[in-house]
Image (tube, rainbow, N blue to C red):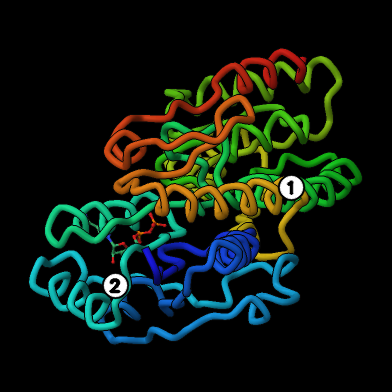
């Protein structure tokens, strides 16, 4: 292996830059050349590929987003476009690739190996923490902390006005962010896509809490929670009880910002290990961290197995909201 490529792909996540820095500098330390592929798979297809040097990585460990840019590339879902992208890599003598991204990006990476024998090793860069085989993903800790600091501020208003707030955090298919944030902010109720809670149950809890003397409450919901989005839930509560619940959708602020120490550390470890795995001849694997140990997890497992939201966190959150 003489020359490797690196890309950031799919949704951006804080810590992607720290991972990129680790990939480039580890590769250089091992005597490899590194080429950066801009804008995810779009850049692979459009030949936006350029050499990266160790010095190009100066001063990025603390920055959110990705200096390589990222992208969603619909063409890459089709084999004929993947063949064109593979040709671009082969023309540049790129022997292997590190892909920093989420499950969609890893499905693309699997196809590159299956169809064109281009070895790809992944580093899990996604705020959703929804990849099987790793306790944490790059960006998750920062997203949780960003949401938490926003909710702490909202609680000041909720408390001052004796109000009920419904705060929606990211998570279309998983409640990882909601369950962590819910426990950490002392939420009165947490709704995630995996929990079949009903509006009736939530209302009962709010009324019970009010009887006990609670005047303000925070409900944390994930985007994909049942039943419906935050505004639907607020409307249902208003209809049932007359309580005017305020809604706050945190949205994209959860993606940005300077990565936490924890995200910078896992990003550095995973990025460096991804390069070493490529050198060892590995492919079709993601670098995960379980019980603080690095491991290679086949993409197939990482993307297809369901990583369960920690419902224990939700239970504990409910117990402590008493
Ligand atoms: P993430 O990697 O954060 O999950 P996406 O799901 O948007 O983000 O995937 C990023 C990109 O990966 C897509 O825009 C597409 O180019 C590629 N991709 C996603 N799914 C597949 C697939 N099944 N086959 C090939 N490429 C895919």
Which residue is painted at 72% across and 39% down in the image? 164
* Tag of residue 73: 2
Q: CA distance from mark 2 to mark 1?
A: 30 Å
Rendered image quadrant of residue 19: bottom right
Give the farthest residue toward the front: 31
- 321, above or below 156, in the image: above
**Quadrant location, the N terminus:** bottom left
Residue 259 versus residue 214: which sits nearer the camera?
259
Q: Is residue 54 above or below residue 116?
A: below
Residue at horizontal 39%, vertical 36%?
297
Image quadrant where residue 137 sits? top right
**Mark 2, other Cα within 10 Å: few <14 / some 14–19 / many ≥20:** some
Q: Which residue appears farthest toward the right when viewing the image?
A: 160
Q: Nearer the viewer, residue 205 or 125?
A: 125
Of 170 and 144, nearer the camera is: 144
Corner quadrant of residue 40: bottom left
SS state under label 2? loop
Task: Determine which residue is flagged by label 1.
Answer: 145
Between marks 2 and 1 in the image, the one whose residue lies nearer the viewer: 2
Residue 107 in sight: yes
Dot placed on the residue nearer the N-terminal end, 2 or 1:
2
Instruction: Name the quadrant where ligand 1 sits.
Output: bottom left
Q: How many marks?
A: 2
> Which residue is drawn at the image coordinates 78% and 22% (left, top)?
210
Task: Assign the C terminus to one quadrant of the image.
Answer: top right
């Amino acid at each position: 292996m003489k020359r490797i490529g690196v890309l950031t792909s799919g949704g951006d996540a804080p810590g992607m830059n720290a991972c990129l820095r680790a990939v480039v500098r580890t590769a250089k330390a091992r005597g490899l050349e590194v080429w950066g592929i801009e804008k995810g798979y779009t850049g692979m297809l459009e030949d936006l590929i350029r050499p990266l040097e160790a010095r190009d990585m100066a001063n990025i460990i603390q920055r959110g987003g990705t200096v390589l840019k990222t992208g969603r590339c619909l063409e890459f879902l089709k084999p004929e476009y993947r063949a064109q992208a593979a040709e671009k890599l082969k023309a540049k003598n790129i022997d292997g690739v590190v892909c920093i991204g989420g499950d969609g990006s890893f499905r693309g990476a699997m196809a590159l190996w299956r169809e064109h024998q281009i070895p790809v090793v992944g580093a899990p860069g996604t705020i959703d923490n929804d990849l099987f085989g790793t306790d944490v993903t790059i960006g998750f800790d920062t997203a949780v902390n960003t949401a938490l600091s926003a909710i702490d501020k909202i609680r000041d208003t909720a408390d001052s006005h004796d109000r009920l707030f419904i705060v929606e955090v990211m998570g279309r298919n998983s409640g990882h962010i909601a369950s962590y944030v819910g426990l950490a902010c002392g939420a009165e109720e947490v709704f995630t896509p995996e929990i079949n809670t009903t509006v009736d149950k939530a209302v009962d809890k709010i009324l019970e809490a009010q009887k006990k003397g609670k005047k303000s409450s925070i409900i944390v919901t994930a985007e994909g929670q049942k039943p419906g989005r935050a505004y639907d839930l607020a409307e249902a509560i208003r209809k049932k009880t007359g309580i005017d619940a305020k809604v706050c959708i945190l949205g994209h602020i959860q993606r940005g910002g300077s990565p936490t120490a924890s995200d910078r550390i896992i990003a550095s470890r995973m990025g460096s290990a991804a390069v070493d795995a490529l050198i060892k001849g590995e492919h079709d694997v993601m670098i995960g961290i379980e019980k603080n140990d690095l491991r290679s997890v086949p993409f197939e497992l990482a993307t297809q197995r369901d990583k369960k939201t920690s419902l224990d966190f939700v239970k504990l959150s409910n117990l402590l909201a008493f």
